Amino acid sequence: MTSLGNTRIAFIETMIELVEQDPKAVLVCADSVLVVKGQDFIRKYPDHFIDVGIAEQNAVDCAAGLAACGLIPFVATYAGFITMRACEQVRTFVAYPGLNVKLVGANGGIGAGEREGVTHQFFEDLGIVRTIPGITVVVPADADQVRHATRAIHQVKGPAYLRIGSGRDPVVDCEEIPFELGRIRILAEHGKDIILFTAGFVANRALLAAEVLSKEGIKATVADVHTLKPLDRKGIVTLLKKTNAAVTIEDHNIIGGLGSAIAELSAEECPAYIKRLGIQDLYTRSGNPESLLDYYGIGVKDIVTAAHTTLKRRDS
């Protein structure tokens, strides 16, 4: 049974810590207090909170104004409402002038399907923000990493996008592995036959697949690419050169997210055999999160099969 954490609570608890340390930090919501579990923050720091109502474009513009005055606003609501409904505001009024606004998108991936369905399952967000210049993009693996990532983007000057989950997010047993913005984390290193690149709340699946592969005689390394921008080009290329084979695993459209980032880098620096697992450019159904991931080909068995297929292509 996979242990679950709550990335939304992790974010809010870290925001409370940040305000205690830095009074310039503020939280901006768009009728999304309940979404991001912000009640405790409001009770403790009401003067550091602004709610603009169901008006995501206004929320981003409000944050731009706050940042222009020297504050550090965190805009927190559903991932798709930030990256789609307010995309122009993110691009033109935050990223273009390079303002110090932090964007926090909940319900990243299909993990919210059990409660809210396809309108609130967002698997295009990373692809959208990756194409906008100047935005740091972070996809933590679990609640513990959300805490580290929230602190890290607070320290970064300029726009950042942080993806959080549904509030029922698998815990990855790797707290001892340091989190450094812009650097991959090696979660497991069985050997150098193939690399399993993962981003977000599917890391446990990659780790389980690596164990299965190891029993089958295939030694895999699992790398967590939690920062999509700036990408750890050196770290990723070093791994690809060792194996010439990789599988990418993400809860996102295979277009524009982790798979695209790894394939683009590989094409430029180190051509390798790569199989991308994720949402295969389609609209998903609603349902239990774990079942949905299996249904759409992001299960442990799918990762194992993809590894075999990739190695067969490489060695043929």
Image (spheres, helix red, strand yellow):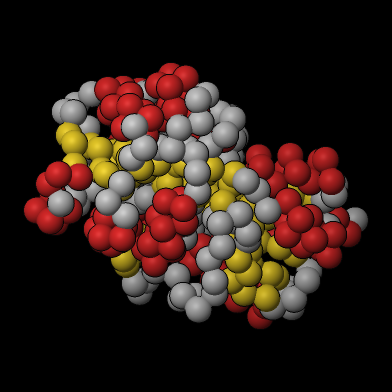
- In the drawing, does residue 68 fall left or right of residue 15? right
Q: Nearer the viewer, residue 314 or 123?
A: 123
Q: Position of residue 283 (x, y in %)?
A: 43, 32
Q: Position of residue 109 (x, y in %)?
A: 42, 45
Q: In which quarter of the view is residue 222 placed? A: bottom right
Say which residue appears at 50% left-offset and 78% top-offset: 176
Q: Nearer the viewer, residue 134 or 174?
A: 134
Say which residue appears at 33% left-offset and 27% top-offset: 65
Say which residue appears at 32% left-offset and 55% top-offset: 22
Q: Position of residue 160 (x, y in %)?
A: 47, 41
Q: Is residue 225 in sight in this rendering?
A: yes
Say which residue appears at 54% left-offset and 71% top-offset: 178
- In the drawing, does residue 70 fall left or right of residue 252? left
Image vertical order of residue 141 relative to residue 286, above or below: below
Q: Quadrant of the N terminus?
A: bottom left
Furthest-left residue in this view: 43
Image vertical order of residue 164 relative to residue 81, above or below: below
Furthest-right residue in this view: 316
Q: Quadrant of the C terminus?
A: bottom right
Q: Nearer the viewer, residue 250 or 54?
A: 54
- In the drawing, does residue 47 fall left or right of residue 13? left
Q: Is residue 280 in sight in this rendering?
A: no
Q: Position of residue 310 (x, y in %)?
A: 76, 55
